[in-house]
């Protein structure tokens, strides 16, 4: 293995160990809130734009994942239609409010907003609009990086200012961590790997909280496993129409 591949893997391993060492209390506290929300019939909404949208998709309709997850996946904000336009659009004040008009965010729900920099208008306004609707808001961001950049929202807020619980992916400025001689920029971003592991840990803790409080956790089965589609049919019957993209 090249020394640079090894450097990246060692860096990610160290970041995941920091999550384990430093963020378990936040994970358990957030899991308790999400479990209470689901037990009372609410939904867990997850939003990101650009590459952060990958993490919203990570929790949605996933084998081994919680069923009552509504991923807010807006194609104009993704890199799948026009990557540059998604960068511009994330900075437009007012877009988030229009986006949420078509999402089932209600009082008592939980909304997790993901943004590496936490400085752009749309994730900040998703968090503020969700709070105005009576939802609990959590954030996943690169805390130190976010604190070093200016807000692009008229309020001056950053995402970490708008959330009840903040999860840190420990990302460096610009996200990439490996310096290779002759290459002008660092390469190999960490936010997706660390963020995905952190969110899957949160999902596991939430399922455990549900089970411990006497509520059967609704979990998707793999559609490619024997009996998986049959078990999923009951979940679809319960949540289709409530979760936008099912």
Image (cartoon, rainbow, N blue to C red):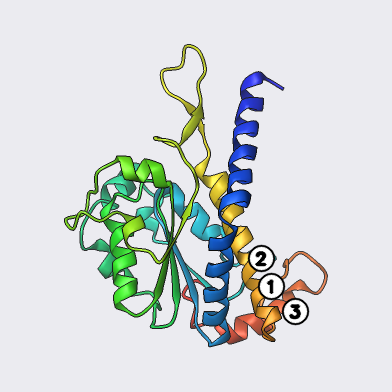
Q: Looking at the picture, does residue 245 appear above or below residue 51?
A: below
Quarter of the image for residue 160 reads: bottom left
Residue 72 appears anywhere in the view: no
Quarter of the image for residue 105 reads: bottom left
Q: Is residue 235 left or right of residue 181?
A: right
Tag 3 near tag 2, CB within 8 Å: no
**Kind of element beneath mark 3:** helix
Q: Residues within 10 Å of mark 2 (few under 14, many from 20)?
A: some
Give the residue at mark 1: 208
Quarter of the image for residue 214 reads: bottom right
Q: Residues within 10 Å of mark 3 (few under 14, many from 20)?
A: few
Q: Is residue 42 left or right of residue 207?
A: left
**Kind of element beneath mark 1:** helix
Q: Looking at the picture, does residue 214 appear above or below residue 105?
A: below
**Which of pointers 3 and 1 lies earlier in the amino acid sequence?**
1
Q: Which mark is residue 204?
A: 2
Residue 5: give x, y in percent of width and height. Answer: 64, 26
Residue 181: give x, y in percent of width and height. Answer: 50, 13
**Quadrant including the C terminus:** bottom right
Give the residue at mark 3: 230
Tag 3 near tag 1, CB within 8 Å: no
Q: Is residue 22 left or right of residue 74?
A: right
Tag 2 near tag 1, CB within 8 Å: yes
**Kind of element beneath mark 2:** helix
The CA distance from mark 3 to mark 2 is 23 Å
Name the foreground residue: 241 vs 51: 51
């Amino acid at each position: 293995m090249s020394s640079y591949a090894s450097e990246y893997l060692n860096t990610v391993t160290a970041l995941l160990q920091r999550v384990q060492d430093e963020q378990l209390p936040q994970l358990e506290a957030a899991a308790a809130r999400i479990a209470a929300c689901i037990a009372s019939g609410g939904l867990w909404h997850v939003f990101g734009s650009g590459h952060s949208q990958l993490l919203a998709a990570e929790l949605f309709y996933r084998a081994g994942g919680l069923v009552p997850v509504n991923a807010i996946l807006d194609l104009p904000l993704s890199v799948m239609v026009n990557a540059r336009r998604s960068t511009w659009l994330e900075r437009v004040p007012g877009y988030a409010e229009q986006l949420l008009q078509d999402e089932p965010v209600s009082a008592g729900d939980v909304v997790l907003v993901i943004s590496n920099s936490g400085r752009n208008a749309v994730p900040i306004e998703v968090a503020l609009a969700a709070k105005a609707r009576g939802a609990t808001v959590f954030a996943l961001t690169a805390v130190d990086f976010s604190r070093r950049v200016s807000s692009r929202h008229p309020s001056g807020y950053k995402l970490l200012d708008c959330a009840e619980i903040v999860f840190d992916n420990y990302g460096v400025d610009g996200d990439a961590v490996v310096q290779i001689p002759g290459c002008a920029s660092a390469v190999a971003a960490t936010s997706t790997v660390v963020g995905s592991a952190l969110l899957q840990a949160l999902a596991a803790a939430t399922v455990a909280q549900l089970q411990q409080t006497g509520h059967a956790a609704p979990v998707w089965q793999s559609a490619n496993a024997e009996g998986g589609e049959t078990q999923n049919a009951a979940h679809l019957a319960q949540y289709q129409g409530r979760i936008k993209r099912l």
